[in-house]
Image: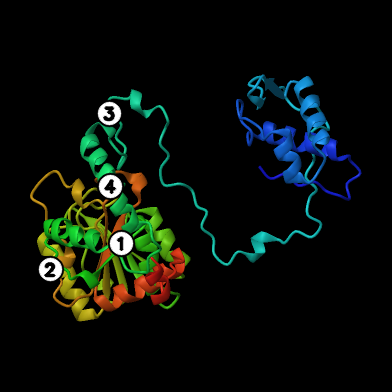
Amino acid sequence: MLIYLDPHSTLSLQHQIRQKLVEAVSCGALPPGRRLPSSRKLAAQLGVARNTVTLAYQRLIEEGYLVARERSGVYVDGSAPEPRPGARAERTPPQAAPHWQRRFRHRYTAPPFQRFSNDRDRYPYQFIDGPFDPSLYPVAEWREATRLALGVREINDWSVQADSSDDPMLIDEIRSKILPARGIHADADEVMVTVGAQQALFLVAQLLVDSNVRAAVESPSHPDTRQLLLQFGADLHHQPVDEAGLVVDERLDSVDLVCVTPSHQVPTAVTMSLERRRALLTRAAERDFVILEDDVEGESNYLGYPQPALRSLDGSDRVVYVSALSKALAPALRLGFVVANREVIRELRALRRLMLRYAPLNDQRTAAF
């Protein structure tokens, strides 16, 4: 606990200590039942006489904020009163605060796409797209995987600071088990792991989109996709969706990028037909635009045989494929990945390194381990 005492304050040291502790109790930084440092320890930390801290503690005990337990210490009282007027220091407003609204170069605030009620579990049919069903969670398998991952040898492997590469075992699992189910075959340098699919989309947009790019999005489409492209200055074109998926026609001839969710279109849930997929890839090759395939909802196709991913049909290497493991496992894990041309992956790795502040180990530091 850090307490700053102002040597130039008109208040006594004892009063400042009391005031700081009351603030911490009032805002929840010191929750009920929390044990406070001993008077000797706090006095040494603050550089004041122990008697000063003892008197501050005694006063707060009398006022009902703290309680002393014999041979145990001083604790925050569970029934601490509300601070009296003047007991809590008023924050002094900045004298020359910047006008933040004028300094924003990009705006990321937007109306939320969906809001989940906290009491939705009481409804037998929720009709909400994408929430996690805990009843289907493989608890035993996850517990065993966690036990294995926390072994001494495994901790020594994953706890050291790594460079911008991905865990080879994870990449191999994605290449050998996840991607073949979507018809995709990729080398290790064509796959990159991200902190969820949203980071993957953000990195791809940052790499490929600026104000000179005309990007086609499905109409209707996920608001977050549109918002993301607009943040990077894209000129948006809204391409309609029918019962076979994204409509492929001459309106796509002037775009540079097409963002599409072919396996499970959001929000219509339409699955793009195989004929439409081939038509989109053919037009992309003829008109030289690239495709961003968002396959996060790919496992949500329950009505028929799954269609192959666009990436698996791509003969000109112009599809950037984005998906996630968290949808199938647990959303809070935030585990996604990108599959693309190795040149694209190389640039995305460099961009991810800047975002996540990776620090590569040099030979000397590696030898130290």
Do callouts 3 and 2 mark residues in contact (Cβ within 8 Å)? Answer: no
**Residue 116: image x %, image y %?**
40, 36
Q: What residue type is labelled 1?
A: Val
Which of pointers 3 and 2 lies earlier in the amino acid sequence?
3
Q: Name the residue under label 2.
A: 313
Residue at image point 13% right, 75% down: 315
Q: Residues within 10 Å of mark 1 (few under 14, many from 20)?
A: many
Q: Mark 4 points at which residue?
A: 327
Compute the Cα span from label 3 to label 1. 34 Å
- Please state the total of marks drawn on the protein image: 4
Residue at image point 23% right, 75% down: 318
Q: 312 or 45, which lies in front?
A: 45
Comparing labels 4 and 1, the label whose residue is closer to the camera: 1
Q: Residues within 10 Å of mark 4 (few under 14, many from 20)?
A: many
Which of pointers 4 and 1 lies earlier in the amino acid sequence?
1
Circle 4: element type: loop
